[in-house]
């Protein structure tokens, strides 16, 4: 049964008990820990409990025309704890970065039930080691996230998307090159081919955000480059609505088109500016040359009895 | 355990170091070592036993292997511009200065990356790529001297962090020699994608103050330079009005590239030194710089000017040319230098408070100034709440030194009380060790110590820093310390 703590203290107690008995534990249901604890719009920071969903948080922030600039799939189901544990991102990562760039403070319960803090509530802070980074993408293998503080951004005054269907992967490459060497600064630079039959002729999508003037000027520039059909991020929702798991490939952006060719006609979406491709073809090979020994030492240090889930590597 | 006393080094060890890096790359004469006795935090000083200047990763690894065999402390050093004693050789030891590994190894324009050696100076990177419209965003005030490796060790900031983030947001990966002499690549590899499986060790190492090993090569992110800047300077009656203007700018949905504030004392010093034509009775000068695409920037600048006027700005200047913009910045960047006219010495702090608490913090600093009978001008990053009070004193007067330290102490305690941090950029080093227990719990500190053990189980890399209970220079050479 999934443990469902009623408070941070309760969560710490459950962990301490499991640790004392060497029992494996987790994941947790953090639905009861779903409050916005402190939101100071003029500081552009927010502190929340980790069980709140990303969508619920964004609703709160939008009342003050602010947001946490990450846009992963399924925000209505995704808790902040999930966001930290899985380090998921969406199309706008090209413009804004990932959750790593916005997490400024964290409170976690360690495997033995001790509660620790790292970072704080201010946007610039170098006191002590930056432990918070360790928990991002750790799949809950080091600790259970209780509370997080994020720096925020104002919601853009305007956002607009345009697309162009590419006749071939060669043409796709030329479009990307043209965008990269132009003066426009899109927040989305994506490719998608939602059915295998389109894999050789993907659609390129550009997204612009900012003031009305900035967005309109960039739309004009995009038109000049030949990217001029009105678009939206519907492809993103469609791709992730398919329940089959997607595989992630991360390569140098300059090698992305070659990598897509290597997928052999598989449906995919790609963050072309970042070199990240999600597809449902053959699983990508594991990354090699990782500092596995250091990672193992990190795991053994924070979870010496291996009671928390393992790090999938 | 770290060694407990000043380190002694045998002639045999020095010869072995010479055999690794070459005779001319080992410094052990006392007068030549003086350069390395401290960083820009000069209240504590200690000579390392020896300084080595390696030129390759292999040499760094060989030096560290020797240190591991002989159980010697290692002190990594870049340009020594840090401000908290981060590179102080507290018990002596082998200092590894990276200033001969300065090459820009590769610039990949297509993928917007640069691979540099750790001793490469920060500003060189932007200089090398700016013709292509790219730049390296983090710009600490010491950027013409400080090294990229040092930036990684201290997670350096700068005036543009509100919008662009700090060093950790712009480093993809790096090569590092661990204290056991193994060479690892952490984070994104030069030929690899930006997503790296497993733990974000890159993030954990950045800001470790050189305690996890010696970074030798760094892969940097390059970003597109802004098309245009709009730089404004507002003269206000007082700090409160200027602070409200900053809050209103943020509330209007704008994120300026930089927001800097100078109070009355520093404005007077700058005026006396450089004659910018500031009224000497102005309570605060605010510099706001918007940057980005040219389209729409004009309208935003008008809005900023309107907000400043609404908050009772006496005068708002908008730089009309690039030269005028550089002139406006000059008054900010030279502010520290202008202090020389006011006082023989100053102690600077870099605490952080939530931006909304800035007016309260400024009032507290004023009361501190009165309490300790010392002048404290302020120049600070108003956008992110990072203060830089400059506590003026004369080091020839021991009582003034004591009062300056006490004032600094009070100010940092207040930062913690207001929900902030004792350091936004400079780091803990040896200077702020005593504050760690104020800002963190014992469990927090134990979790940090645990991470240190992962990288350096023998605690030999940059020892006696950051953690309460560390050895102090005063334990070994009290005459070298100006004040306790």
Image (spheres, coloured by chain):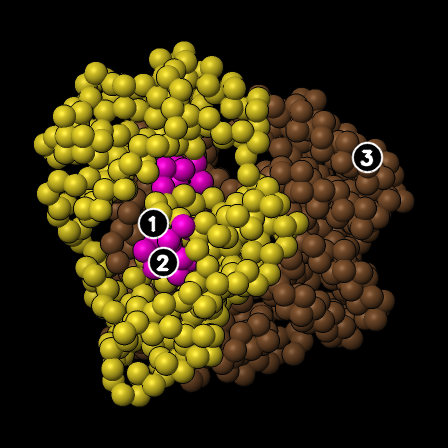
Chain colours: A yellow, B brown
Crowd band around label 1 with a 10 angstrom C-alpha radius: few (<14), some (14–19), many (20+)? some
Q: Residue at x 23, y 24 (%)?
A: A202
Q: Nearer the viewer, residue A212 or A259?
A: A212
Q: Residue A83: where, in percent of width, then height? A: 38, 55
Pointer 2 with pointer 1, Cβ within 8 A: yes
Horizontally, residue B88 falls left or right of residue A224, namely: right
Report which quarter residue B153 is drawn in.
bottom left
Q: CA distance from mark 1 to mark 3?
A: 43 Å
Q: Is residue B316 above or below residue A283?
A: above
Asked whether residue B441 is drawn in magenta, I would say no
Q: Nearer the viewer, residue B56 or A175?
A: A175
Q: Residue at x 32, y 55 (%)?
A: A86
Q: Is residue A260 visible?
A: no
Q: Chain of mark 3?
A: B
Asked if badge 3 and badge 2 are on a common chain, one would say: no
Q: CA distance from mark 2 to mark 1?
A: 8 Å
Among all residues in the image, which is located at the extreme bottom?
A: A20
Q: Residue at x 19, y 39 (%)?
A: A279
What mark, if any, has residue A88 been given in the picture?
A: 1
The residue identified by callout 2 is A82
Q: Residue A214: where, in percent of width, then height? A: 54, 24
- Secondary structure found at label 1: loop
What mark, if any, has residue A12 been given in the picture?
A: none
User: Can you tell which of label 3 and label 2 is closer to the viewer?
Assistant: 2
The residue identified by callout 3 is B309
Q: Chain of mark 1?
A: A
Q: Is residue B331 visible?
A: yes
Q: Which range of residues does the magenta coloring cover?
A: A76-99
Q: Is residue B236 above or below residue A267?
A: below
Q: Nearer the viewer, residue A305 or B211?
A: A305
Q: Residue B360: where, in percent of width, then height? A: 76, 60
């Amino acid at each position: 049964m999934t443990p469902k703590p009623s408070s941070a203290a309760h969560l710490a107690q459950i962990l301490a008990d499991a640790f004392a008995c060497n029992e494996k534990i987790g994941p947790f249901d953090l639905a009861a820990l779903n409050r916005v604890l402190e939101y100071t719009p003029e500081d552009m920071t927010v502190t929340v409990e980790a069980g709140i969903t990303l969508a619920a948080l964004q609703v709160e922030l939008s009342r003050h025309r602010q947001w946490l600039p990450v846009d992963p799939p399924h925000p209505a189901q995704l808790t902040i704890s999930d966001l930290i544990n899985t380090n998921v991102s969406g199309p706008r990562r090209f413009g804004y970065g990932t959750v790593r760039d916005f997490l400024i403070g964290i409170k976690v319960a360690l495997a033995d039930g001790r509660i620790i803090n790292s970072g704080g509530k201010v946007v610039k802070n170098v006191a002590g080691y930056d432990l918070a980074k360790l928990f991002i993408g750790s799949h809950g293998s080091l600790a259970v996230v209780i509370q997080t503080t994020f720096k925020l951004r104002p919601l853009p005054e305007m956002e607009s998307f345009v697309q162009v269907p590419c006749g071939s992967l060669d043409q796709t490459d030329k479009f990307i090159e043209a965008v990269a060497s132009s003066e426009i600064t899109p927040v989305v630079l994506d490719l998608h081919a939602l059915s295998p039959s389109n894999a050789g002729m993907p659609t390129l999508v550009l997204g612009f955000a900012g003031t009305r003037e900035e967005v309109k000027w960039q739309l004009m520039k995009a038109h000049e480059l030949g990217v001029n059909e009105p678009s939206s991020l519907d492809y993103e929702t469609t791709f992730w609505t398919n329940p089959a798991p997607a595989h992630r490939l991360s390569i140098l952006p300059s090698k992305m088109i070659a990598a897509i060719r290597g997928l052999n006609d598989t449906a995919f979406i790609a963050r072309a500016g970042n070199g990240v491709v999600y597809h449902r073809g053959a699983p990508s090979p594991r990354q090699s040359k990782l500092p596995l020994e250091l990672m193992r030492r990190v795991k053994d240090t924070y979870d010496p009895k291996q009671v928390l889930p393992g790090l999938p590597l | 355990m770290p060694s407990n006393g000043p380190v002694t080094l045998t002639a045999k060890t020095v010869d072995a170091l010479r055999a690794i890096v070459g005779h001319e790359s080992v410094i052990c004469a006392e007068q030549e070592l003086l350069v390395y006795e401290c960083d820009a935090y000069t209240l504590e000083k200690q000579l390392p036993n020896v300084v080595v200047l390696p030129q390759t990763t292999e040499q760094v690894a060989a030096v560290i292997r020797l240190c591991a065999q002989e159980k010697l402390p290692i002190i990594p050093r870049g340009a020594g511009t840090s401000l908290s004693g981060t590179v102080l050789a507290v018990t002596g030891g082998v200092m590894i200065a990276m200033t001969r590994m300065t090459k820009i190894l590769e610039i990949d324009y297509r993928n917007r990356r640069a691979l540099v050696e750790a001793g490469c100076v920060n500003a060189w990177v932007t200089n090398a790529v700016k013709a292509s419209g790219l730049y390296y965003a983090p710009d600490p005030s010491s950027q013409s001297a400080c090294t990229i490796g040092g930036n990684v060790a201290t997670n350096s900031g700068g005036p543009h962090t509100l919008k662009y983030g700090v060093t950790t947001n712009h480093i993809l990966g790096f090569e590092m020699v661990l204290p056991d002499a193994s060479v690892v690549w952490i984070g994104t590899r030069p030929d690899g994608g930006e997503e790296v499986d497993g733990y974000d060790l890159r993030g954990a190492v950045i800001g470790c103050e050189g305690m996890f090993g010696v970074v030798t090569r760094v892969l940097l992110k390059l970003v597109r330079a802004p098309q245009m800047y709009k730089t404004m300077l507002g003269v206000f009656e007082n700090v409160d009005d200027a602070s409200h203007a900053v809050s209103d700018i943020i509330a209007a949905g704008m994120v300026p590239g930089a927001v800097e504030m100078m109070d009355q004392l520093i404005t007077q010093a700058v005026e006396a030194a450089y004659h910018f034509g500031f009224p000497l009775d102005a309570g605060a000068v605010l510099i706001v710089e918007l940057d980005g695409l040219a389209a729409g920037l004009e309208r935003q600048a008008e809005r900023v000017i309107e907000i400043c006027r609404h908050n009772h700005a006496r005068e708002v200047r908008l730089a009309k040319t690039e030269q005028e913009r550089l002139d406006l910045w000059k008054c900010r960047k030279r502010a520290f230098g202008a202090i020389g006219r006011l006082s023989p010495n100053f102690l600077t702090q870099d605490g952080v408070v939530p931006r909304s608490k800035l007016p309260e913090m400024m009032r507290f600093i004023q009361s501190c100034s009165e309490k300790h009978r010392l002048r404290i001008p302020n120049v600070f990053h108003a956008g992110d709440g990072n203060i830089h009070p400059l506590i003026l004193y004369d080091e020839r007067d021991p009582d003034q030194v004591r009062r300056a330290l006490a004032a600094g102490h009070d100010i940092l305690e207040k930062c913690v009380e207001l929900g902030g941090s004792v350091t936004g950029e400079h780091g803990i080093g040896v200077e702020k060790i005593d504050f760690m227990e104020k800002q963190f719990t014992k469990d927090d500190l134990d979790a940090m110590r645990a991470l240190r053990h992962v990288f350096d189980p023998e605690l030999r890399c940059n020892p006696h820093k950051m953690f309460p209970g560390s050895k102090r220079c005063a334990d070994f050479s009290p005459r070298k310390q100006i004040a306790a």
